Image: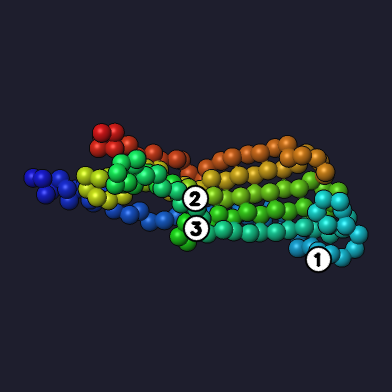
Amino acid sequence: AAAAAAYEHAARIAPLEMPQPCVPTPLTPTKPAALGTGSSSASLGVAPDEQLSAIGSIPGVEVTLLSADRLPLPLVQLALGGEGQPITVAVEQASSALPLLAEACVPLSARWHNAGLLCWEPLIEPADIQLKAQQSSAGSALTTINVGLSSPLELNLSDSMLR
């Protein structure tokens, strides 16, 4: 009976299929600017009739919290980005007269270490955090920041986690 329960538990925590990589969508359908040509604006080096457009990514960041015991054991691991799902950022300004737009996509997941089974179990199922920032007018500070999720945030709690 104990073996059947362990098998059932292992089947329940099998790795889930990862969602498609999180990529910011183009903010406006325009061509990239040729930086360094023409007269430049004070903040971004964009000529009045040119556009600034940049997309970048970083592989990811993992943070693991360890116990304070003599032999430290892993407790919780938080991942931003990760294998096959980088953190991506897009920045765009259609011209120096128009406001700056920025969008970021941050894949998030967390897992906890079940010392009884000697394995990692999901705490937060993989989800994509969408961040969007926009100026109200050119040259002003960021005035609008939106944070959203691409799907509902799924949090897994179990009695063995709370012991």
Q: Quadrant of the N terminus?
A: top left
97 relative position to 91: left or right: right
- Whichever of callouts 1 and 3 sits on the residue coming sooner in the sequence is 1
Judge depth for marks 2 and 1 and give the one in front: 2
* CA distance for labels 1 and 3: 29 Å
Task: Pinpoint residue 72: horizontal percent, then vertical percent.
Answer: 32, 46
Of residues 83 and 33, the one nearer the viewer is 83
Residue at the left extreme? 1
Q: Quadrant of residue 146?
A: top right
Task: Pinpoint residue 4: horizontal percent, then vertical percent.
Answer: 12, 48
Q: Amino acid at mark 1?
A: Ala
* CA distance for labels 2 and 3: 9 Å
The mark found on residue 80 in the picture is: 2
Badges 2 and 1: C-beta atoms under 8 Å apart?
A: no
156 relative position to 94: left or right: left
- Counting other residues with Cα less than 10 Å from the Cα at mark 1, is it few (<14), some (14-19), or many (20 or more)? few
Give SS at disc 1: loop
Q: Which residue is mark 3?
A: 85
The mark found on residue 136 in the picture is: none
Badges 1 and 3: C-beta atoms under 8 Å apart?
A: no
At x 72% / y 43%, what residue is drawn?
Answer: 134
- Whichever of callouts 2 and 1 sits on the residue coming sooner in the sequence is 1
Task: Pinpoint residue 16: horizontal percent, then vertical percent.
Answer: 35, 53
Q: Is residue 88 visible?
A: yes
Q: Amino acid at mark 2?
A: Leu
51 relative position to 56: left or right: right
The mark found on residue 34 in the picture is: 1
Of residues 159 and 64, the one nearer the viewer is 64
Q: How many numbered discs sit on the rendered protein? A: 3
At x 83% / y 43%, what residue is drawn?
Answer: 139
